[in-house]
Amino acid sequence: MFLLDTNICIFIMNSRPLRVRERMEAATRAGHRLAVSSITLHELQFGVYNSAKPQENGERLRAFAAGLSVLPFEENAAKQAAIHRTALKKIGQLIGPYDLLIAGHALALEAVLVTNNVGEFGRIEELKVEDWAE
């Protein structure tokens, strides 16, 4: 399963860079499951309501999300996020709070996290990460 991070979702919705949308379509054709965390959906919805064109962007988000599974953030995801937040705090390498939650969710699901933010997510060694924008 591929869990799409917020920045990848935005790239796909904007078809920029085009290679991200092409990678998504190839993954779908290959039978891979594509999903987003409910945390990612929150970030995308915030972007809609905070934008200059909430109606237009809301429609684009609804159309995009209709083709994906939106997975609820559950207990094991919370545990994974807490474990890795503690570990990163101990070494002074914390990442953003939403990124920690999304990483915990990907770990709990044993999913590959697709992100353009490899530098930050790469601090979590156990996390499988791909950058489709490369």
Image (cartoon, rainbow, N blue to C red):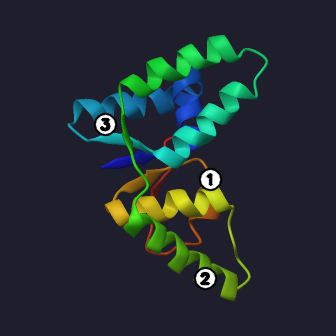
Residue tagged 1: 117
x%, y% of residue 118? Answer: 59, 57
On screen, 11 above or below 88? above
Give the label, 2 or 1, closer to the camera: 2
Q: Nearer the viewer, residue 90 or 74?
A: 74
**Residue shown at the point (53%, 48%) measured from the top left:** 39
Q: Taking 75 as reference, is 15 left or right?
A: right
Q: Nearer the viewer, residue 28 or 96?
A: 96
In the picture, the disc for residue 86 is 2
**Residue shown at the point (54%, 17%) measured from the top left:** 60
On screen, 54 above or below 120? above
Disc 2 residue type?
A: Thr
Q: Taking 88 as reference, is 109 left or right?
A: left
Identify the image quadrant of residue 26: top left
x%, y% of residue 35? Answer: 37, 41
Disc 1 residue type?
A: Asn
Q: Taking 81 as reference, is 110 left or right?
A: left
SS at mark 1?
loop
Mark 3 or mark 1, which has the lower sequence index? 3
SS at mark 2?
helix
Furthest toward the top, the residue is 56
Residue tagged 3: 27
Query: Local crowd at mark 2 within 10 Å, few (<14), some, or many (≥20)?
Result: few
x%, y% of residue 86? Answer: 60, 82
Q: Is residue 106 visible?
A: yes
